[in-house]
Structure formats: structure tokens, C-alpha cells
Image (cartoon, grey):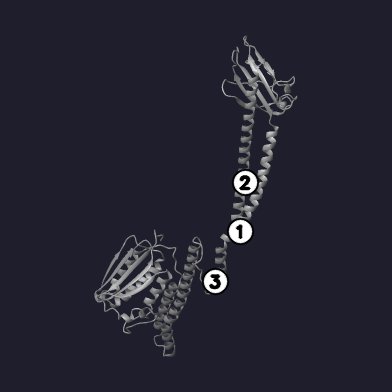
Amino acid sequence: MTTGSLRTRLLVAGGLGLVLVSALATWWLGAMFERSARTAMDERLGNDLIAVLALAESDANGQLHWRDTLADERYRRVFSGDYWQVLDAQGRPLGQSRSLWDDALAAPTALHPGPAQAFDATGPLKQSLRVLAQQVTLPRAAAPVIVMVATDRSQLDAQVASFRQRTALALAVLIALWFAVLVTQVHYGLRPLAELGRIAGQVRNGENVRFPQQGLVKEVAPLAGQLNALLDHHQRMVVRARRSAEDLAHALKTPLTVLITEAEGDGSDWRQTLRSETARMQASIDRYLAAGLGADSQQRTPVAPVVSALCGLMQRVHAARGLRFTCDSEDAAVFAGAREDLEEMLGNLLDNAGKWAAQAVRVDVARDSKQLRITVADDGPGLPPAQLERVLERGVRLDERASGSGLGLSIVADIAESYGGTLVLANDTPGLQATVTLPAGGAATG
């Protein structure tokens, strides 16, 4: 167990909880035992108080007399710890047990007629006493009297202390047993995470494995799913970077061939050729380096401004053909990604639609709680059904008369896939409909 580990945190928290609960249980059980023992002692004192009252009587003049003495040896042995005493209303002694000898119990300071009252006091030998006192008026008595019985509570205190010690010892044993159970529980509960760690080590070593979701506890299974999604995202980023490198190499091939041919020729107009081809190469480098960057799902991009700007741009690009670009986008639609990626995808889709449209291109944007659906439709000739998937392959151009490298739709598919989205082509009536599905975001951050 390393410092700060989850296992240590669980064991420390569980151990402290056990100790705290056990300490509270020891105190509570001790308090309950003490209360029960004290109640039993008060009941015994109450019986002795009734026995003392049974021996007292008043004569015709109201004087108190004793018919006999208590036969209990506890009250006969001097300083035995058990005492009784009767006082008048002014606190003067009227009778007491032999066990008090020449000493006396302190009269209670506030005693009212009614049920007997229990309290603690100090005895003749400075021991702690439990005292029960009651103010009563005997038949034919001229005034009430105070009857007190007391017993040494040291035995009670010793019993309570012994009970607390035994309880603490028993709970300490239970703590040890429960801590062993806790260690086993934590070890068993963390096994799914240990399994995820083992698989993560295999992934780090380059093995083509995925985190299993079947057989995992329901709290850990979503984590395995998110880790698999992260691995898939990373794999898409790697594939996208490789394809961008391939695209860049392909795009640079033609300008390099032109420069080589110019270098081998007479060189009559080499400066113009160099300027145009290097500009073309720089544009390709910028474009494919940007396309090769990883998907940035942290950004939020409002869709409507991007769609409106690109539609306006394409309207000017295809102005000679009189094409009409219509855009319908929800103002609240937000793309969970970078603005550059959205512009790259929509730019390629609009450019492709503009090449094949007869009169019009329409853009529709719809969203639900998690996804955006952007549809670009033209009224051109469409595609043969067998070619709908093949046209998404890299470098494929079904009509050699159209300009371009055949990479536009594949770039759109690559970028959409890097965000976990899709690009689907379908024939409309008439024309071709391209629908790209992307993750929807919340509030835009820029």
C-alpha cells in the first residue's frame, strides 16, 4: 500500500470509523449499564426506606417511637457502608442505624413532599454514597419527618468500570476482526480496478487489446467503456495523421514534377513557375497539416455563422453558373469541436455539391441533445448506387473531367470520424445528399 493510494484511503477511513464507532459504543454501553445498575440500587434503597418506615410509629402526643430495629446485618455493623437515618423537619436526628455510630448523614438541602429523591453524598468515611430520601407524615404525627437510606456506591462504580473495560476489550477484538473483514472487502472491491490497470499496461506495451465491459461491476463498467472510447479516439487520430501525411505527399507530387520539368527545360519563365508552384505547395502544406491535427473536442463552435459564411463564399465562387446556395441552420446549434475542422468539412461538401449541382445547393442543420446533423444536398445527377461508398475512398474521382484530387470527401469522412461522427451519402430526387453527423456542444467558448 503506497501513500495516498485508494486502498490506503479506504482502509484508513474504515479503520478510523471502526475505532470511532467502537469508542462511542463503549461509552454508550457503559452509560446504559451504569444507569441500569443505579436504578437497581435505587430500587433496593426504596425497599429499605419502606422497611424503616414500617418500624416507626407516633404516639398520641405525636412523638416518634421505634417498634424494633432493622434485622439486616448491613445496618447493624459499624460503618458498613449501609445507613439509615430519620430527621425532623428542622434536620434534627430522630433515629438512625447502628452502622452510623456517632456520625450522621447530611440532611438534603431541598426536599419536597412527594416521591423519594435520589442523590449522591459523602459518607462517614468520606466514601461516595447513594442516598434516597423522602419527606413523609406519619399517622398522628405532629410534623413531617425526613427518612434517609444510603449505601456505599463504590461497588457500583467498580462494577461499571469493570464492565467498561470488558466492553472495550471485546470491542477491540471485534475491531480487529472487522478490520480483517475490511481488508478483504477492500481487496475484493478493488480487483476490477486492478484488472483495468493490468489491461492498461498491455495497451502501453503496444498490445491490441480493449477493456472488457462484460463481467465488470456496474460502477466500473462505464469507466471501461470510456477508456475504450479514448483508445478508439486515439486510434482515429493516428490514422488521420497518417492519411494527412499521405495526402500531403500526394498533393506535393504534381508541383514537384512541374518544378523538375522546368529545371530540365530551357528555363525561359522559371520565376513565374517557381512562384506559382511554391505557393501551391505552401497551400497544400498548410491545408494538410491543419487536417492532420487531432480533434479538439474541448472547443465549441456555433454552426450558423460558419454555414452562412461558407454559403456566401460558394455563392461568389460559382456565380458564373448562377447557382443558388440556401442555408437553414438553427441559431442554437453548436459543434463540439474546432472551427477550422467544421470549416474544412463544410467547405469540401459545399465545393463538391457546387461542382455537380444544376441550379441549387441546400444546407440543413438539425440537432438533438447530443448530435448535429448537417445535410448538404444538390440537384445534380447523383451517383450510381454502387458508387456511393466507393466515392469516399481516398483519391477516387468518378469523373476525371472535374478538377480536384479526389480527397475532399475522404477528408470530410476522416475529420468526422475523428470526432466520433459519420459521413453518409445518399441519392435524392434529384441530386446527391451528404449527411455528416457530429457531436453537439453546449455554450460556445470561441
Query: Toward which corner of the image does residue 39 lie, by quadrant?
Result: top right
Check contact, mark 1 vs mark 2: CB within 8 A. no
**Secondary structure of residue under mark 3:** helix
**Secondary structure of residue under mark 1:** helix
For badge 1, the amino acid type reads Thr
Position of 333 with respect to 147 (left or right) is left
Label 2 vs label 3: CA separation?
45 Å
- Residue neighbourhood size for the residue with mark 1, other residues' Cα within 10 Å, grouped as few (<14), some (14–19), many (≥20): few
Query: Going from the N terminus, do you reach mark 1 or mark 3 first?
Result: 1
Position of 163 with respect to 359 (left or right) is right
Query: Toward which corner of the image does residue 141 lie, by quadrant?
Result: top right
Q: x and y percent of residue 189 in the render?
A: 56, 60
Which residue carries the number 1 mark?
Answer: 184
Q: Nearer the viewer, mark 1 or mark 3?
A: 1
Q: x and y percent of residue 192 in the render?
A: 55, 64
Which residue carries the number 2 mark?
Answer: 22
Which residue appears at 49% of the width and 70% of the height?
231
Q: Nearer the viewer, residue 250 or 367?
A: 367
**Secondary structure of residue under mark 2:** helix
Which residue appears at 64% of the width and 50% of the height?
174
For badge 2, the amino acid type reads Ser
- Residue neighbourhood size for the residue with mark 3, other residues' Cα within 10 Å, grouped as few (<14), some (14–19), many (≥20): some
- Residue neighbourhood size for the residue with mark 2, other residues' Cα within 10 Å, grouped as few (<14), some (14–19), many (≥20): some
Query: Going from the N terminus, do you reach mark 2 or mark 3 first?
Result: 2
For badge 3, the amino acid type reads Val
Query: How many marks are shown on the rendered structure?
Result: 3
Residue 414 visible at all: yes
Which residue carries the number 3 mark?
Answer: 203
